[in-house]
Image (spheres, rainbow, N blue to C red):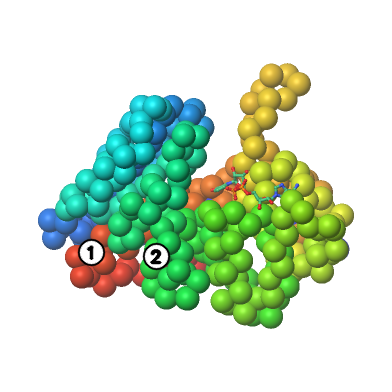
């Protein structure tokens, strides 16, 4: 057993990246190329509204202009796609973020397919997914990119380690597993139909959990000294009526066994937002034929 784990602050790392992002934005502005992020929100999902506000606040803090396009919940697919296509051709817009989930009558894939890959700062279009799989330059999804940066910040060696990814969504689990495998980790993907997750956890050097299942992973399941990255966000109301957010790991018990652990909130979430900013600036630079910024995390 190790002593209690080092708790990795995603907020501190975010702030480090936002300082660099502000410098890149200022230099783009100096060339009369102000970076702009357009956020498309359909309907009034309260959680989505909170996420959108935090992304726009981060953009403002680092000198990226942002525009919010709010479409009514009953918007049809053609109108949504036309809105996206207008942003594709608007030269003042460098990044397009379609806030998910969409209302159930809209098809997510059809809408994502409409986003120009060059402006796809969430890295979810088929082109960027393909580029990631091929380990070629493109825009990577913000949460896996943020997690790779967290791992870099704590000096995690990925080559040859055993990693377990719980969750296999397009947004987090699948791209995350690809990035780890590209760095020569041996990656096991678990999901809701995995027969015995504990079997894989007990030998895992790195555990990343993105299941949306509160406190799914317990300390006693972990290999001592493991690195634990908790992506889960589940809002709950406790017995006293207080609202709080639970992660996918039982933090206290995991902290006693792991060497490194990310908290919820304050771990992966802030790094997702920071990576959206760096993606927007990368996209802006690429669109203007400028070299990509170097993002320093250590
Ligand atoms: P999703 O619902 O698309 O996918 C969940 C995955 O987890 C599925 O593959 C499912 O098979 C698996 N799963 C669910 N319950 C499980 C269980 N009990 N055991 C094993 N596997 C299980 O979710 P998502 O979009 O990847 O998000 C996952 C979680 O991460 C959610 O809580 C979400 O809010 C959170 N999230 C956080 C951030 C962030 O920035 N912190 C970003 C994206 C998602």
Residue 43 shown left or right of residue 286 in the figure:
right
How dense is the environment of label 2, judged by Cα within 10 Å: few (below 14), some, or many (20 and up)? some
Viewer can see residue 2 = no
Alpha carbon distance from label 2 to label 1: 16 Å
Question: Quick one: 279 or 177, which is closer to the camera?
Answer: 177
Residue drawn at x 68%, y 38% is 246
Please state which of the two labelled residues, at mark 2 or mark 1, is closer to the viewer: 2
How dense is the environment of label 1, judged by Cα within 10 Å: few (below 14), some, or many (20 and up)? few
SS for dot 2: helix
Q: Quadrant of residue 151?
A: bottom right
The mark found on residue 127 in the picture is 2
Residue 196 shown left or right of residue 62 in the figure:
right
As displayed, is residue 64 above or below residue 186? Answer: above
Q: Where residue 275 appears, x then y in whole percent? A: 43, 56
Q: Where residue 103 appears, x then y in whole percent? A: 47, 33
Q: Quadrant of residue 247?
A: top right
Q: Quadrant of residue 40?
A: top left
Residue drawn at x 55%, y 70% is 179
Viewer can see residue 210 = yes
Q: Where residue 191 appears, x then y in whole percent? A: 72, 55
Residue 230 shown left or right of residue 67 in the figure:
right
SS for dot 1: helix
Residue 2 shown left or right of residue 179 in the figure:
right
The mark found on residue 287 in the picture is 1
Residue at the far left in the pictured view: 32
Q: Where residue 136 appears, x then y in whole percent? A: 42, 75
Answer whether labels 2 and 1 touch (C-beta < 8 Å): no
Residue drawn at x 87%, y 55% is 220
Earlier in the chain: of badge 2 and badge 1, it is 2
As displayed, is residue 216 above or below residue 166? Answer: above
């Amino acid at each position: 057993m190790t002593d209690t784990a080092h708790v990795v602050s995603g907020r501190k790392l975010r702030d480090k990246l936002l300082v660099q992002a502000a410098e890149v934005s200022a230099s783009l502005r100096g060339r009369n190329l102000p970076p702009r992020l357009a956020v498309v929100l359909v309907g009034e999902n309260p959680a989505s509204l909170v996420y959108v506000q935090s992304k726009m606040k981060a953009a403002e803090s680092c000198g990226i202009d942002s525009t919010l396009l709010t479409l009514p919940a009953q918007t049809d697919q053609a109108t949504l796609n036309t809105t996206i296509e207008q942003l594709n051709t608007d030269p003042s817009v460098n990044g397009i973020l379609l806030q998910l989930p969409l209302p159930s009558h809209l098809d997510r894939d059809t809408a994502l397919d409409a986003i120009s890959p060059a402006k796809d700062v969430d890295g979810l279009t088929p082109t960027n997914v393909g580029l990631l799989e091929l380990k070629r330059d493109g825009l990577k999804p913000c949460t896996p990119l943020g997690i790779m940066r967290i791992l870099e910040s704590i000096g995690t060696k990925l080559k040859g380690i055993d990693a377990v990814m719980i969750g296999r969504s397009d947004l987090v689990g699948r791209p995350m597993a690809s990035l780890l495998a590209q760095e020569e980790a041996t990656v096991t993907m678990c999901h809701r139909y995995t027969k015995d997750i504990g079997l894989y956890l007990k030998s895992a050097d790195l555990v990343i959990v993105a299941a949306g299942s509160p406190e799914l992973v317990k300390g006693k399941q972990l290999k001592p000294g493991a690195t634990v990255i908790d992506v889960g966000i589940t809002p709950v109301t406790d017995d006293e009526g207080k609202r709080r957010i639970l992660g996918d790991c039982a933090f206290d018990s995991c902290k006693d066994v792991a060497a490194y652990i990310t908290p919820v909130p304050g771990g992966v979430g802030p790094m997702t937002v920071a990576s959206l900013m760096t993606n927007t600036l990368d996209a802006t630079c690429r669109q203007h034929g400028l070299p990509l910024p170097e993002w320093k995390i250590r």
